[in-house]
Image: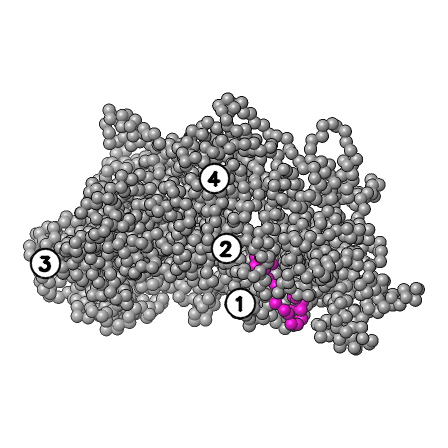
Amino acid sequence: MLCTHEAHPFVPCGRHFSAIHPGSIPDNSKFSSNQAPLHAMFKDFSINDKRESWRMRRSPMSSEGCDEELYVSGRVVIWSRGTAQGKSNVLRCFTADSPVLEALWCSFLISASFDFPVHNIQLPTENDSAEVTRATQVQSSVCIVETGCVNVYTHDGCNYSMALPFTVKKIWETKFGLLFERKVLPEKAESTKTPKKEDTTKLPVLFSLTHPLEELSPVIYTSGNVPAAARVSFFSEPSHRVVYSNVELSLVMTYDSSLQLHCLWSVRRAKPEEAYIACGFSVMDSSHLSGMMSGNDASHIGTPVGFNQSGNGMSRLSMHSGMSPSADSLSPFRANSSRIGSPSLRGVVLANMGQPRNISPSINRLAVFSRSHSPQGPSNSTFRINTPSPLQRSAASSTAGLFSPAGGGAVGQLGSVADIAEPLTPEICLDHVWSEPTSFPRDCSLCAASKVFHVSDLSGQRYICYLVAYKQQLRYIRYEESNDKSQLIFGSPAIVAARDAIPLTTLEMILVLDAKFNLILYSGTMKVNMVHVPGLPSPAMLPPPLSDESLTELSFHRGEPITSSRPPSALDVLNIEELRTLSPVGPEQSCRSYLRLLDSPTAVAELSFQRSSFSNLGCILSLSDPVDNRFTVEITDNSLYRVTFPEMTCSPIIYSCLHALRWILPRDSALVLLTKWYCLRNAPGICCGHSEWNQFLMCLLNLVGYDVNGHPLLSTTDCFSNERNSPTFQMKKRRLSGQGTNSDWDYLIKSSHHKFFCETNGSISGLSIVADKFDPASESGSKMASSSVDTSAVLFPFLNYVLYALHIVYEDMRLDIVLQNQLADLANLLYCIAKDLGHELYADHYCRDVPQLFLMKGKLKAKFSPEQLSKLQTLNCFTAAPPNIYQWLHSFLQRQDCKPFPLIPGVNSRTEHVITMFVIMFESDSTHETFREKFLCRVSAVGRRVSDAESSIFRVPSAKTVPERIVSYMAQLDQNLRSRLALGAVIPLKEAISYCQHNPPADWPEAAYNLIGREDLAKQTRHSCDEEKFLISNPVKKDFANQNKSTKEEDDGINSLDYELLKLRFSKDLRIKEVRKLLQSSLPVCISITQKPEISDHEFIEEQERYLFATSIRTMALPVGRGMLTLRTYSPVPTEALPIPKLCLTGRAPPRNATIEMTHIDVPVNMSHWPQFHNGVAAGLRISSNLQMESTWILLNKARSESLTNEHAGFLMGQGLNGHLSNLPTLSVHDYLIKGHEMTSMGLLLGISANKRGTMDIGITKLLSIHIAALLPPTSTELDVPHNVQVAAVLGVGLVYQGTAQRHMAEVLLAEIGRPPGPEMENSADRESYSLAAGLALGFVMLGKGSEVLGLSDMGMPDQLYHYMVGGQKRPLTASYRDRYKSPSYQIKEGDCVNVDVTGPGATLALGLMFFNTNNSSVAEWFVAPDTQSLLDLVRPDLLMLRTLSRSLIMWQSIEPTHAWIRGNLPQIVAQYAFDRRKYSKDPDCDIDFETMSQAYCNIMAGGCMAVGLKYAGSCNSDVFSTLYDMAIKILRLMSMSVLIEQAGKTTVENCLSVIIVCLAMVMAGSGDLSVLRLCRVLRSRIGTPVTYGSHMAVGMACGLLFLGGGKYTLSTSPESVAAMLCAFYPRFPNHSNDNRYHLQAFRHLYVLAVERRLVIPRDVATNKACYVELEVVFKDGRTIEVLAPYMLPELHQLSEVRVRGPRYWSVEFKVDSNWDRLKRLLKGNGYLYVKQRVGHLSFEKDPKGYESLLAQSLIREQTFGKVLKAAEIRSFTSDPFVLGFAEFFCTAEHSNSHLSQMLSQVLYECVSHEKLEVLSTLMSLHHNLSHLDKSCRPIDLWQLKLIVAFYQRAKENFPHSRLVNPEFFISCQSKVEAILASWLQSAGPVLASYFGGEDFPESPNEQCYNLLAAFLSWYSIPHPRALLQMGLQQVQTFPSLFNVLRPSGLSVSSIMSLADAMKCAVSVTDQSQAAV
């Protein structure tokens, strides 16, 4: 009997949580106060409203032992997860509006283009290869089904709700989504006997859902052995119901209640042709299927199948479903007469319009809104059908019944597309693969399977099991895959009697509740044993339930343990019935009356009564909730207990042994071994823990045939003998008296604790070990002589198999440094088996690893006789010489021939990886397949096939160098496996790591970088995959926060900056504090005006308010600049609204801080409207663009009042510019627009257009067209659209169609530039801004296209624009414009000429953008400034600036950042006479208009400066800065001279100064330049005329540009960015806050479209703090600059390489031809460049000048190896806490005289100074092994040194790079080993003589002698004496002849010489002994 762990009471976690859950909140808003309580009472009243159910699964996110629970109670669904501590955490809780019918976990396959997370769920297998390419991601979800809807909640937070058109009976999870089973009422199913004529078809009962956003589609099925046209049909039989689905196998089991049959179906995607056939169409030519599916070739589509009524009665599949017409509302199909959505059927309908067709009524029944794509992904999977499908008999008739019109009559002629209703295309198809045999009894409709599960047995065979509860049968279906894995092959079924059953997946067993309520464990169909659950009463203790009186008298208690009186060795028989007696249960009693009751036909009806009657019996009624090895039992009193089965083993060695034996033994034998072992290990009363190995020995030896009573392994093992001799083991019953026996003392004396105490403290206490050690001469020999072998044992014929399998495990353990200490246990077992079988070479192999086994040599003879050996089966791969992994590796390094090493999949994977690593290093030409065939040999039993899970998934990568290939391969392995590799096996990996650490490849994964110790690159790789989409806002530094004391109520909008970065970039001044002060707009301004004596109080108040008004103009202009400063610096809380700082227009008068408001003076109306809009935009731009903002959060920020605000309008525009309006639903957009709020409409249109820039989105185009009259049809209704909204909509069209050169839009925008005023009162005010917007929009559409665009050459666009620019006679309007402008304008009277003042700016900029960077000199000549005064008088001065700018845009490459180039734009006359009136004032002949010349000079120079600023924006070029700065200073000096400024006018000079300041800030964007900031501060201090609102706006924008995005962003100079900057920095600023005449103020924020992030922020990967790093930037022209990061990189298209340089940090390189995309992703994300500090250097923060680092380098050069280093000295090399701690505790000065401290100091110094800390453990191990070689030598340690020496000898040729360890060190180690062995050889004559002579070893008091013997044999690879004899060594007399004989075997010269010396010593001892005789 088996014993599980203690059962614990189980209560679902959801039950506790639901008890305190408030439940759903009733919605009584739609009822009156009198109706609400009554409605609530009836609504909440339900008998089954609190139904409780749950399901459990293994947690995919946690370790083993943690389950997840999905609990349903009424309307509440609770998802919880258990923890390793036994607690449960609620993950999510869902509350539904109606009672929940079912909840389950599910997953959906989605396209790779969708942005959904991928979870650890199996993707489509080879059966759906097309599906793998079509859907590469899996969306994990929770599905909740209610009465009328289904809700899907994804793991990433999305939720979908879909209405259900029918009542759902059950839902099932599949690989492709969900299966919905429609509920069919019984009375409706029975009414099919008399179907109505109008309803002759049935509706499907199965529907599929492949994604929550799609619709339910009917499921079709296929059956074989019928015509192809008739074997496809809808799954519409009501008698079929689904009982099971399996995602992994993609199988579904159904039950046919009419035939009482179970069937299996494979689930796959429906093929297009199958969908056609199912929908009633026959495909005439399959070669044109693709054309049909696209709807382009409808001529090849055949007609629908005719509808013919069957005269002999309809088959079951064609019967009427019995649904009345009133039930059509519940149907999943609904007619759609206006939409043909499916491409697959659209061609059919269109091709047959107007033709008489016979259309099946089923098409009308299946009419739904279909998806916009046809089903794809046909599957090529086929399954072998062993038995005919139950649906085949009526497939043809069912098809005819579904798709044929009655009587063959025509339904009618298709007059139009609207007359056709389209069926929903099937998505899923079920292929019949298996049916239940007819031999199974089918006598009742209750024979449906109540449980179905998929399980494997211990031998690897797989089954599908289903429980027929009514018959109390568990039926097995064995299956396996075909060789090509294309189909499943099912075997004959088997039956096991069972009331209930569950799978134990991790144990690969089945737990069955039999008819007697006993728990029995099965592995497949093999009965393992009975199961006892501690804590539960056993049915054997229950009396028979004869009467009520007997029931009341029952009382239960735990019986006394009934133990066996047999000796412990009797357990080797392992008989199931005998093991039952070990159970602590009482004698079995009868329960026949109760069982007879359950076996009766009325059991189902009487079961509930019996459960209530026998609720006190404690009998197990059911098993449920299996998860791994855990399950739940329910007893008769409805109590639940959670039970856990013990694991197969806790020992990794036993696990490997069992796995190897399972693989190599035949299936039946392996199954017996595993079941017997599990029974023995978990039998009641058997001790576990440290004795598990002994249990395994007893089990294995018993099955092999040994007598475990006399076997030396069991009699000499201390821990096991202690247990066998313990009183508890000998007599398992309670003592009735307190008297003791001698056995108690004997037990203590022989315990392992007593031995340990005597060995460690014997000298102190004087105690000695009483129990003698193993004496091979006496105990073993006598016991082996008396033992016998049972040749009839199960595993006796396969003893060679056992030896070979365990030997492979043994070799794999030798490579594990953790398991090496346990080698002796397995070596003892293998030695005994090898000696019994006569395999001397194997026995000698184990002796060399475990020298203590030499004591048994000669004493333990071969046990088996020749007759017994003849009964053993031979293994084909068994070799006479044992496979030796160390010898194999050494021979490989010595270039010797190596036979393929045996490999057992999943057992010796460590060996496989080590061999692969060595082969990669020295056989670089070998591919993955060739070297596996050459160097590895797979071992398995006959008939074994490697599954996908057992085969190696690791592939040898292709890399440039061998070390890179090694690291790439080993990075795929588990870190635990790599860290436990033996020293000799891991040294190639460490060498490869050392090589790759300095210059690793750029395309490695994160694991490879972690392996080589480059955590910086690993973290960089991880962040480059997904650059922290959800960024955390950088907190304000405490010191700064305390200084400013900004609270939530006083949020100024600037507290979200990254002050850590700003402090690093600008650490020497307070410029950040200053710019924050300059752009502050939320605090009152200080009004410090002194009242003069002659001024009254009233006048003084007015003076204060006038001063406040002047400063308020500046305050109102600040939000635009503040938006630049705080751009994308904030991450909001999703549950809170965005704080918008207030725009404060009040003042404070010191000293009392009296509030000053503008109440006594006149101020403009609506003065603060546009500033509030800018304030809202600045707040919206704060949000990071990397965040995914939901539409609900955007609506959360909407004002609570009904009226919209200007700030929210700006907020919407800011969201659109940052790309967050893409998630805004169309309905929400409609709600915003219908309010008629002008600024909201502007912000929304511009934001959405910017969000869809260049996409030509049709939806956005329609939205914009509503606001533009030119895009509406001529007959459309006239809409009253505000003028500013029209301006915004026109530019929005340009943004949406940017760079597309779309003809229609270009034509409309061209006409809109010259739109005349009118009709009537329309288009009369601010016409200039509309024309400018149309020109800019046209420039966006035609950006850089020139006049050579195909299809636009006939428009004459350049000529028309030139006409608008220079003027002339108006051209005739087009027809549409003539009709629109019939009525003239009532306000403006224009003549026949073009109004250049209106059309000139827009046309000029449109030409410049259209021919951007085309170098079209002919067009550029149009913009040359006139060179005569008369011509200059014809041009408005400010237009000269635009012409100069447009000419520069065309000749983009000719722009130079010099004074000469800027002055080169001036005509000669302007350059000569500008500002020179004084010089020519006395010349009477001078008739020059100096005012015209001066104004032209200012505007042309400003236009040239703006062109330079646009080209070099964001470059921080020093030459450009000097040129523009000089121009700004020159203009400032000019303004100080009243004589000169009068010649041009203050307004003109002020506007030019504003333009130059903005251009200067554009060039230095993001740099925080101090000179520009000082200049802006001076200009900001001016208040009053001529400083206007626009001047303050320009200064504020300049300040914001200097610190763009908190210093993280700069400007780009791409064509799109130049166009956006031209629109945002248009060189004409508003005169007042409401001025939109020439340029709409909302366009000032379009600079966001030109922003890009190029700031590199180094961050130390160890401390995660920003730091300084030296960068080297290489340009494509060869220039190289060295900068100190954080640094704003130049534009990437100018660079070829960026790398970290300098000695402080490891090199990181980004190159154009390798990993340039990674740099782009880095900059696009957060800009963090992770770096790792090198050893010997400190950071710039700790060592700014590098003096300490230089000191460390000097120490390195001195090579001071003799001193003991201090921790303080180590700090000069590194700040690694591990290294500092090691130096402090192991290399302290207190131990300066200790040899150990000196050795550790030298090792540490060597590793730290040469940056090879990874070899520290290697050197320490080598030092330790060599220092103890002569005392406690382990041969396996010498193998490590031997492999390292051989590796470096061969590596000299392949890897000339520097070594981790000095080769001279290994030479000295080799010499020391050989010296110790040579010294031992002089006195080892007797031992060597015994070894070579095969005699018993002499008694030696020193065990070290045998250790050195094993070391000698292993170091020199001395062959076994038998092998030497086979070489003919007995005839050798001289050393040359010995050399000739042994050299072909591969022995080295030193080995041959050592062997000769050893043989000489042995011969001399033999001669002396013979002479003595």
Q: Which residue is mark 2?
A: 1019
Q: Position of residue 789 (x, y in %)?
A: 71, 53
Q: Position of residue 10 (x, y in %)?
A: 50, 34
Q: Which mark is residue 499?
A: 4
In the image, what residue type sits under mark 1? His
Q: Which residue is mark 3?
A: 1390
* Residue at x 71% of width, y 48% of height: 708
The verdict on residue 1265 being magenta is no
Of the residues shown, which amino acid type is indicated by label 2? Lys
Q: CA distance from mark 1 to mark 3?
A: 84 Å
State the CA–CA distance, disc 4 to disc 1: 52 Å
2 vs 3, front mark: 2
Q: Which residue is located at x 41 percent, y 45 percent?
A: 441
Identify the amino acid type marked 3.
Glu
Q: Is residue 1549 above or below residue 563?
A: below
Q: How is the image coloured?
A: one colour
Disc 3 from disc 4: Cα separation: 99 Å
Q: Which residue is mark 1?
A: 928
Residue 1517 shows up from this direction: no
Q: Is residue 570 visible?
A: yes
Q: Do the CB atoms of the residues marked 2 and 1 lie less than 8 Å apart?
A: no
Provide residue 570's location: percent of width, then percent of height. Answer: 69, 43
**CA distance separating discs 2 and 4:** 55 Å
As helix, strand or loop, the secondary structure at mark 2 comes to helix
Q: Is tag 2's residue or tag 1's residue first in the polypeptide sequence?
A: 1
Quarter occupied by the N terminus: top right
Residues shaded magenta? 887-910
Amino acid carrying label 4: it is Arg
